[in-house]
Image: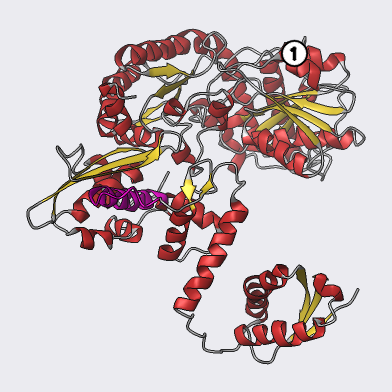
Amino acid sequence: MWDYTDKVKDHFLNPRNVGEVEDPDGVGEVGSLACGDALRLSFKLDENKRIKEAKFKTFGCASAIASSSALTEMIKGKTLEEAEKITNRDIAEYLGGLPEEKMHCSVMGREALSAAIANYRGQKATKEEFEVVCKCFGITDKEIERAVRENDLKTVEQVTYYTKAGGGCGLCHPKIEAIIERVRKEMEKEAPPVKPTKKKLTNIQKLKLIEETLGREIIPALKADGGDLDLIDVEGNKVYVALRGKCSFCPSSEVTLKQYVESKLREFVTDEIEVEEVRP
Amino acid sequence: MKTVYVDNNATTKVAPEVLEAMLPYFTEYYGNPSSMHFFGGQVQKKINEAREQVADLLGAEPSEIVFTSCGTESDNAAIFGTLDSYPERRHFVTTRVEHPAVGNVSTYLARKGYRVSELSVDREGRLDLDELRETVTEETALVSVMFANNETGVIFPVEQIGAIVKEKGIPFHTDAVQAVGKIPINLKESTIDMLSLSGHKLHAPKGIGVLYIRKGTKFSPYMIGGHQERGRRGGTENVPYIIGLGKACELAKAHMEEENTRVRALRDYLEAKILEKIPNTLVNGDRMNRLPNTLSVSFEYVEGESILLLLSDLGICASSGSACTSGSLEPSHVLRAMGVPFTAAHGSVRFSLSIYNTKEEMDYIIEHLPGIIQRLRDISPFWHDYVKGRK
């Protein structure tokens, strides 16, 4: 059984603002029967352009209904500019949290809100320039990007929990991975991660950090040039790697190793790292 | 709040008689049945008795009964134990609607390089025996087809399936976890070589199962250890649970007629009332070939988890094939394999009864369920559209 908070249960058992606003200013609709949940949100503005009335109709599980109910309560009295700032995280927090597997319900709420606001402004829903990444659930690259950015997601599994993308046949997993990688790189540029204070690492921490750094910083770049790299062993601060693909016979591989691999590892792990190549 | 438990395909209450039979074997008669002294010997005798009780329910020989830890272990042992005995055969046949205890083994085998064939089912959940005939070949190591489906209760014609399989000299296993105790089974005149059952589905506790292995069936032990279970399953016998399961099998045999008359009538009553009182409701699975205790219904335009939680709020315990209840995003593989439309697959609810259920309990469900479905439909945009005739 899901561990729902009392607030989720309350909004599920006593949903607020069920229905459709008469003569609405904006209507947003997301999800579908096939997906297993769907939300239709409508709102009306008052003379000061604040949301006077908001109503929902939802097909879905308890957390989908609770998220919709919460959303309508949260946006009432807000201007559209204020309402737009609401993230799925805010919805989940309003409910005292949602199980991670159910975060997509809060994302659905936020998306319905965007769609309804866009509808009011006379725009087509914000899906103008997009690619449908997950064909099973009809999730676009833009939606995945936004979920990764707002919730600091790191894995495909998390993206599935938050957006449903990748929860069906699984064919789109490589695409989702690529989006996560790209967005995370952009995020790092925007706000470079605080350099961890260099305290002494345990062996396992060091190994993990080396693996992470290779996977995130180094291997993708090598792959872009048709190469690859395997981690063979770690002994103290000595890191043994084997170059694969084009790298293995590239005349500048020595340079790659020292100037690129080693310097990256020194940057992210510890500046005592030395990289050595293992040849077959 | 009263509890109406109608989720007996998930697990059952331990029968009081079963618990009573088990209790002395924790603190009084705790000997190891393999020991040479009288203290272990008396336990050995009780285990033999339990083995006879299980064999009696199945129409098997006591020596063909192997105690395991659960239904999943029995399924795994049957599959891996057979594949190990036929290393040259690299083909495994099963269906698309198996329990994960077989279905995920099938996926695993495919990953390990086996050729795997999963037979499809029609809209009613029935197999196409011609497809089976075309699928089995000399290189097939094992065919494993469930006796009855856990979600819909649909019963497969296992004897016919076994006949087709045996004609080609291939061993046949059936996962009968949902069938044993609910419908009569006679393995004496049967085409089944191996059969799995699980104690907690028939009023014994969780943590005990059986693999029936017909005399003369090639089998390599899956759990390698001591000489227990004639070398077919190592590990000290789970004495109290084995004794409990023996008792449960004896009770199941005594209750078989009630299960197929009174319980069936309760299920049929519940089904008829639901269909009468709630529009846009469909029954999933072949109604003519179904376990007497199982009812799978789909309510269009609403979602199963919401239904279950509202039922649960009234003390009614059922389950659903909806995606949201499992944490996966797609509705039950069984309903999808049957081609149940999405409008209905997400809103499926399974009621599974036992001899402990009463007519009053059915009336309690019938009293509240229509209101629950209507309440959720009132929230659902699709119901709104459906009523408006927009879709």
The quarter of the displayed image where residue B244 is located: top right
Give the image location of residue B158, x and y in percent: 70, 15
Residue B116 shows in the view: yes
Give the image location of residue B200, x and y in percent: 56, 31
Q: Label 1 amino acid?
A: Asp
Q: Chain of mark 1?
A: B
Q: Main secondary structure of the magenta part?
A: helix
| Number of numbered labels in the structure image | 1
Q: Nearer the viewer, residue B114 or A10?
A: B114
Q: Which residue is mark 1?
A: B130
Which element is circle 1 on?
helix
Give the image location of residue A276, x and y in percent: 81, 84
The quarter of the displayed image where residue B39 is located: top right
> Where are the magenta residues, as a range?
A104-127
Give the image location of residue B300, x and y in percent: 38, 24
* Location of the N terminus of chain B (image quadrant): top left
- Residue B266 versus residue A121 in the image, above or below: above
Task: Judge from the rendering whether residue A220 lies leftward or rightward of residue B92; answer left or right.
Answer: left
- Residue B216 versus residue A41 in the image, above or below: above
Q: Residues within 10 Å of mark 1 (few under 14, many from 20)?
A: few
Q: Residue furthest bottom?
A: A272
Residue visible at 42% across and 27% down?
B343
- Report if residue A122 lies within the magenta region: yes
Q: Nearer the viewer, residue B266 or A141?
A: A141
- Report if residue B256 lies within the magenta region: no
Residue B230 shows in the view: no
Residue visible at 40% across and 64% down?
A150
Residue visible at 70% across and 12% down?
B186
